[in-house]
Amino acid sequence: MSNSSSISHLLLLALADTRQLQLLHFCLFLGISLAALLGNGLIISAVACGHHLHTPMFFFLLNLALTDLGCICTTVPKAMHNSLWDTRNISYSGCAAQVFFLLFFISAELALLTMMCYDRYVSICKPLHYGTLLGSRACAHMAATAWASGFLYSLLHTANTFSLPLCQGNVLGQFFCEIPHILKLSCSHSNLRELELITVGSCLALGCFVFIVFSYVQIFRAVLRIPSEQGWHKAFSTCLPHLAVVSLFIITATFANLKPPLNVLSIPGSGPVSSVLNGTSSPEPPHL
């Protein structure tokens, strides 16, 4: 196998060797999918149909639910198919599509979480300017920026990754297509562009994290200045769910990227579950 032009398909990681465990993984993925579809579907329906929920916070929440559904639909159906039919194959173009859409939805989700933090910051720290800073046009532009930036980053990253020649076989060490595992199959030593894109993405993610931390420092300082206990409760009730989702997103992403390369079957289901949660942290429920 001299280069990627001769590769028609790739082999994903086998989740289990026995039929019983394969069916167990199928049921596990099915449960995760149904829970995500139900939860996010209810959020989307409630925000779309409830006119009293047409506010910036719920507008961003609707977009966040769409990114979660996108992450689930990108990786889980193929894993369910492979577990049910005892196969590991994925086409080369299908692998590229999986990488593109997963990066797209995760990048957009991180941007939306940052914008939701800004929404909470303005509503608590600058309530008199809330309608001006977060009008319908401003929210639409912010959401469009999140989706466009995710699309551009994933397009550049995917195009650069799959332009590298592959000559180290076609077996991936993950149950879905992931860039680090694809780069391990590359025989090219000119990965400078890929490192540049990873550096840019890491800097952007770090910038979002710093912005979120700084915003919440300002939010908590403003809340502590509220004289009434009822005001404290109201402010915290709108912030803590978003903060919980951000924490879950960061923790699962960190765990998925820093854990040692152990056999995922050492604890049945632990590897697949953490990988799925990495891009599919459920958004906070709307406060109706």
Image: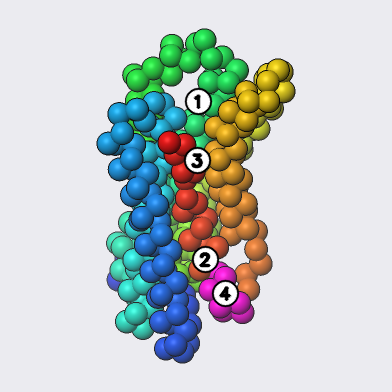
C-alpha gap between disc 4 and disc 2: 10 Å
Mark 3, residue position: 110
> Mark 1 is on which residue type?
Asp
- Quarter of the image for residue 88 reads bottom left
Q: In the depicted view, which residue is nearer to us: 235 or 271?
A: 235
Mark 4, residue position: 264
Of label 4 and label 2, which has the lower sequence position? 4
Whether the residues at callouts 1 and 2 have beta carbons within 8 Å, the answer is no
Is residue 99 something that shows in the picture?
Answer: no
Of label 1 and label 2, which has the lower sequence position? 1
Residue mark closest to the camera, 2 vs 3: 2
> Mark 2 is on which residue type?
Val
> Tag 2, which secondary structure?
helix
> Tag 3, which secondary structure?
helix
Whether the residues at callouts 3 and 4 have beta carbons within 8 Å, the answer is no
C-alpha gap between disc 3 and disc 4: 26 Å
Residue mark closest to the camera, 3 vs 1: 1
Whether the residues at callouts 4 and 2 have beta carbons within 8 Å, the answer is no
Q: Is 170 situated above or below 104? A: below
C-alpha gap between disc 1 and disc 2: 31 Å
Mark 2, residue position: 273
Q: Say left or right for 55 vs 121.
A: left
Magenta part of the chain? 263-271
Q: Residue at x 49, y 31 (%)?
A: 116
Could you classify mark 3 by the number of other residues whose Cα lies within 10 Å: few (under 14), some (14-19), or many (20 or more)?
many
Mark 1, residue position: 119
Of label 3 and label 1, which has the lower sequence position? 3
